[in-house]
Amino acid sequence: MLFYTFFLIVEYRIIYDNLLYLRKEPYQYELVKGKVYFIKEEKNKKIFIIKTRNGSKYYIQTDRHTEEFENISYGDQVSVLTLCRTINLQNNYDLFLFNSYDVQKIGYAVKLEQNFGNQNFVSQCLRQLYFITTKVKQTLVEISNKKLNSPINSVILRVILGYEDEEIKDVKIYFQDAGVAHVLVVSGLHVGFVFILTYFLLKLTFLRYEFKIILSCIVVLFYMFITGCSSPVVRATIIVITIAAANLLKQKQNSIYSLILAAFIILLFSPRSLFNPSFQLSFAACFGIVYFYPFFYQHIKSSIENKNIVFQYFVKLFITTFSAQIMILPLIIYYFNKVSTVSIVSNIFVIPLTCLLLWLGMISYLVEFLSSGYISVLWQTVGILGEVFLSTVKFFANLPYAKLNITTPSSYAIIIYYLLTVAIAKLIKKKSLILYLGILILSTGILIFSNSIFKKRIFKIKFFDLNFGESVLIKTPCGRTVLIDTGGDEKVAKFKIIPELYKDSLNKIDYLIITHAHYPHYGGAKYIISNFKVKKLYTSNYVPPWTSDYKEIFIDVLKRKIEYEIIHTSRTILVNDNVEITVIPNYVTTASDEIKLTDYNSLLVTVRYKNAIIVLSNDLPGEYILEKLSMMKLKDKFLLVQLPRHGKYEEDVKQIEHLFVRNKDIKLLFYIITGNKKFIGSTLRRSSFTTKIFGNISVEIQYSNVIRGIKKIVHTKDGLVIEL
């Protein structure tokens, strides 16, 4: 047990620091030859996983309706021209794909060069099974869309089949805020419900006990294929079948042993699953229930055993949920930086509704196939239950402080938490429950506030490595935070910017600056404003008429009562703790094209800290940067310059270089080049660092340090750290 707990704590460091750091590469054309062993269809795309002869696995997407890829099946030997890249473990989405499918590269299918097919008997069987399950799934989707109104149909499909419709995105946030998002992912909960329903229906027959168990397992296996054989479903199916096999063999069951056996079987075929967050959460939750439930139940058993059976049920469900939460809390905070304060209570109501919805939905599907009688009544009942289900989730999601954003805890805090909660529970098993709850509250406090307790005073500016767009974070020694631009779209904000904010122990943005209304700079703003606390917004006064989506940002700003300011003249927005941040607008009334007109009417941001000046040029051309720099007192200052327009124009570089040729008293530290476009490196006479090569680039200055130049450069798994 202690080994299991310890392994969950240290595994992240082992896999990231020593084994699996994959360097980011650009997209390149590659002819992929190999065997198709996984196919998944979504609403607008089709996904293949192809395994080559050398063992590399490619996660390849194509449009769902592309004709040449329609006839590809399991086991086919194919040759596909693909635009692909190596996955980047700094990217949360890539990390999810790596953990879920064990792939090394991700890409898009350009052309099917050849499909050799496969006559292997096993592959033929898998192909037929795929056709059957795909046809059944498509039929179930059509039935749901025909019988139920939106968004209930999408919710039902997600709960029962794991089928993700575009419409679910609008309501998914409610499930996340209520702490019940797990019911939308087909996992152990759903597999268990399917097994129970099947076994209950078979109990109405005269079959022998052994046949009932075997048939229930077969149904669970079929359910696994229908839902797409995702990792959580496969894991849960193995656990259920393992427990069922123990029953068939008349073996005395030990829950911990069954759990270990299931984990062993999974890891035997997929050792890397051990490092999968989903795997850890599943087994941590099961371990929590097995380990803590008897501890809590023995203290309240005498108080509830004479009560109403419904009351007993809800109390037991509360203890079950609470027991699971104890074990998964550090993992939830560590991986998702978010915790629901209402999840323990919301699950008591949502899980039974999920069970009823899944059972009634499956019975409705079954009756739909077998008979036309009572169909409308059944589906009307499913629709009403779905409305109740969704309303319950929304109620808990809209409660004040239902969700808390928490920064990534330190490894020491996680170790202390598990030692206190797991080990001490064993020591005081027969003693005071109040004492243990006090220890649990203490350990949770250490977990949540560990970064505040051990926080170092440091000035930090981080240039994010974004595939699309630009974003820069400033963190002052006293804890103020400034985010400059938000990347080009929602995915960048969700998978790259916000996770990095949590890693830097941030739970708020004091000042958000959008330099100009060009979408690579504001595309992620709406998502960040909706999912992260922002105190004040600054932006340029030039808003082109063609950027309606940019104007929509201000609707959210007003809705959330975020203070904002339009910059008309030079404005110093922060003077604190030796830090001075100034925003300088630029005005251009004519330009050769719309993009230049947008970019040139941008904000220049300058940061002064001690005897260093950081110039953030964004998309302003070099001539305007020179004009602004000429007004500053740069003598005896260390200068760090972000090259204009990502360093892709030679004239910008020459103009900036000319400034330092004329002014010998300026001590240029280095250039920073952001973005993923090619830069003019050959013309640079001084040191430069680019996010295209190094990933995230952080410049750090200890509060007590005197700036004399570059002190140290450290390569980390998150990118480059330059200490001054």
Image: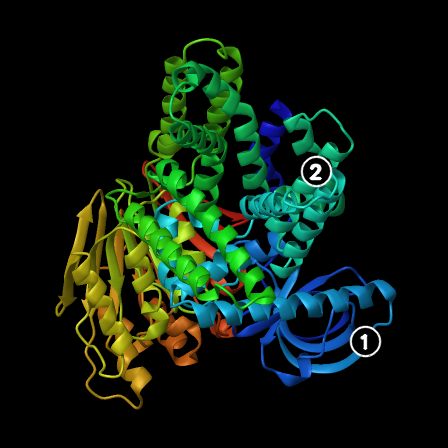
Q: Is residue 21 visible?
A: no
Q: Residue furthest bottom?
A: 592
Quarter of image, res 444 = top left
Dot 1, crowdedness within 10 Å: few (<14), some or many (≥20)? some
In the image, 64: left or right of 209? left
Q: CA distance from mark 1 to mark 2?
A: 37 Å
Q: Nearer the viewer, residue 298 or 685?
A: 298
In the image, 207: left or right of 662? right
Residue, x 49% and y 63% (percent of image)? 164
Q: Nearer the viewer, residue 8 or 243?
A: 243
Residue, x 68% and y 56% (percent of image)? 222
Disc with the residue nearer the chain's start (1 vs 2)? 1
Dot 2, crowdedness within 10 Å: few (<14), some or many (≥20)? some
Which numbered disc covers residue 117?
A: 1
Where residue 86 sits in the image (x, y, percent)?
63, 63
Where residue 144 sits in the image (x, y, percent)?
48, 67
Residue, x 31% and y 48% (percent of image)? 397
Q: What kind of residue is marked 1? A: Gly
In the image, 286: left or right of 488? right
Q: Is residue 564 visible?
A: yes
Residue, x 56% and y 54% (percent of image)? 95
Q: Quadrant of the N terminus?
A: top right
User: Is the residue 398 above or below the residue 344 in the image?
Assistant: below
Q: Nearer the viewer, residue 233 or 275?
A: 233
Q: What kind of residue is marked 2? A: Ala
Q: Nearer the viewer, residue 167 or 80?
A: 167
> In front: mark 1 or mark 2?
2
Q: Which residue is mark 2?
A: 244
| Kind of element beneath mark 1 | strand
User: Is the residue 516 above or below the residue 571 in the image?
Assistant: below
Where residue 34 sits in the image (x, y, percent)?
78, 69
